[in-house]
Amino acid sequence: MFDREWEWAQLSQFVTSTVERATLGVVSGRRRQGKTFLLQAMCEATGGFYYGALEAMPKHEALHELGQALRRFTGAPASYNFQSWGEAIDSLLALATERPIPVVLDEFPYLVRQSKELPSVIQHALAPRRAQRLSSRARLLLCGSSISFMGGLLAGQAPLRGRAGLELIVPTFNFRVAADYWGFRDYRLAAIVYFVLGGTPAYRAEHLYDDTPQRADEFDNWVMRYVLNPANPLFREVRMLLAEDPTIYESGLYSAVLTAVAEGNNTRGGIASRLERKATDISHQLTVLEDAGLLVTDKDAFRPGRSYYRITEPLVRFYYAIMRPNWASLETVRLGRTEAIWGAARKNIFPSQVAGPVFERMCRVWTADMASDETLGGMPSKVLSGVVYDSSTRQSHEVDLAAFSSDGELLALGEVKWGDVIGLGQLARLEKIAALRPARRLLLFSGAGFMPQLEEAARESNGRVQLIGLDRLYEGD
């Protein structure tokens, strides 16, 4: 198990609780983050029961398969012949009359797709004074990869709202943990691999067979060998993510929205204009994509009511910026065509539409979660991007990073450049913005390094000017 100690501790606390009745937990997270691994390991460690549902299995077949799994678990001479989900859930609760054990229903959305009544059945089974609940110490765990569906289980007027004692979301690895997991010590290589695959751990073992680039000069061939290769599952991974989400129907317009965002259109109006539609025409798609965890809305740091849409996963961004526009050519594997497509994208699209935005996000994560209070001049409560308007010159200045304290004080302004060596010009620009919005610190992030004059200016600033290169991003604070 790698870097899931906190999640394991939360599961352990829930499963071993001394509560003298059956309890409910919900585990969710994007596919391939290790949810099933965690739950199966917990069942093995505690003698619990695990059942993983299959997609598109009719209700009667799902009940039959569950009965077979229960027979194997209990050693009963014959399979359980369930006629309803009510019978099945009561039998699951009866597994834990003597001690608490986990009882896992994995891929829960698959079950509900064929049995809409199932959440209500569980609600009834876990009624506060119901005898079957009071006599059971089962820790019923529902797990699924559809973020929108699993989040909706406990929201609003949903039947299970208020019933769960655990709501655990298994996240992707952040860029530091991803580098450790992949075994990278070359931080430039770690960053460019993260720009493509993000922090999803299963990609390494399931799709790459632990074949990782060892040097930055191997990166291009590695991308073509796996990510742009139609024979590798990574090639269709993003399409599968959309197809597997039950809230996304007729994915064409959803894909068009994600393409527009990947191209740099990050406002509602900008996305609508790119698609030649009215903003109201895409409201539903934006909401569904947010609920599915594919888009997130970031507020503007300086303009209330203004917000920006951002693609959450690097591989999704990579797909819509580079792969989808060239899908037909990549899929037919024309001789030399893949090399030409990637060669052109590597020079232009990859730096601006993939590396730049993902690197900015990495720098905001570092500022929010890894930078010391001394670096920022205080503890940040939120880190955003935004636009500062100068009324005297009627000019707008984009700010890559703005860190605020809990009382709203602006701690730091930041400039982020992935491919540029930063010099005094970028510092002067930040100073100009700081004259409009005073900040304790000025942060300059670069994936390519800093000019000597800027390094000298930073040394003479008594900590006001902070330079953060890749070594500090991955190791320092």
Image (cartoon, rainbow, N blue to C red):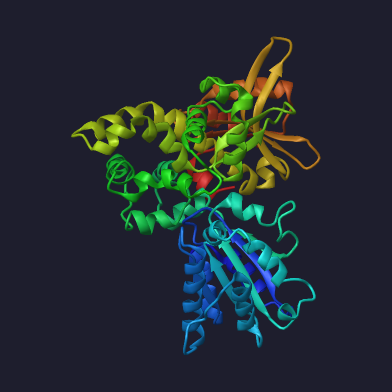
Question: In x, y percent, where is residue 360?
Answer: 54, 35
- Residue nearer the viewer, 252 or 29: 252
Give how far across and how far down residue 226 sits, in percent.
31, 46
The answer to which image quadrant residue 284 occupies is top right
Q: Residue at x 55, y 68 (%)?
A: 105
82, above or below 279, in the image: below
Instruction: Please give the name of the residue rendered at 69% of the width and 81% of the height, measured from the top-left corner.
Output: 136
Image x and y of residue 262, in percent: 48, 31
> Residue 278, how many percent across, how many down?
60, 21
Residue drawn at point x = 46 percent, y = 46 percent: 243
Q: Is residue 104 above or below residue 107?
A: below
Which residue is at a point 57% across and 61% down the rendered structure image? Answer: 115
In this view, the residue farthest toward the bottom is 77
Quick check: 26 above or below 64?
Answer: above
Using the image as rendered, state which of residue 363 and residue 422 is in the foreground: 363
Q: Residue furthest left?
A: 335
- Decide if residue 127 is on the left or right side of residue 367: right
- Taking the image as drawn, is residue 1 in sight? no
Q: Is 227 left or right of 34, judged from the image as shown?
A: left
Would residue 287 be seen by someone viewing this image from the given angle? yes
Question: Residue 439 falls in which quadrant of the image?
Answer: top right
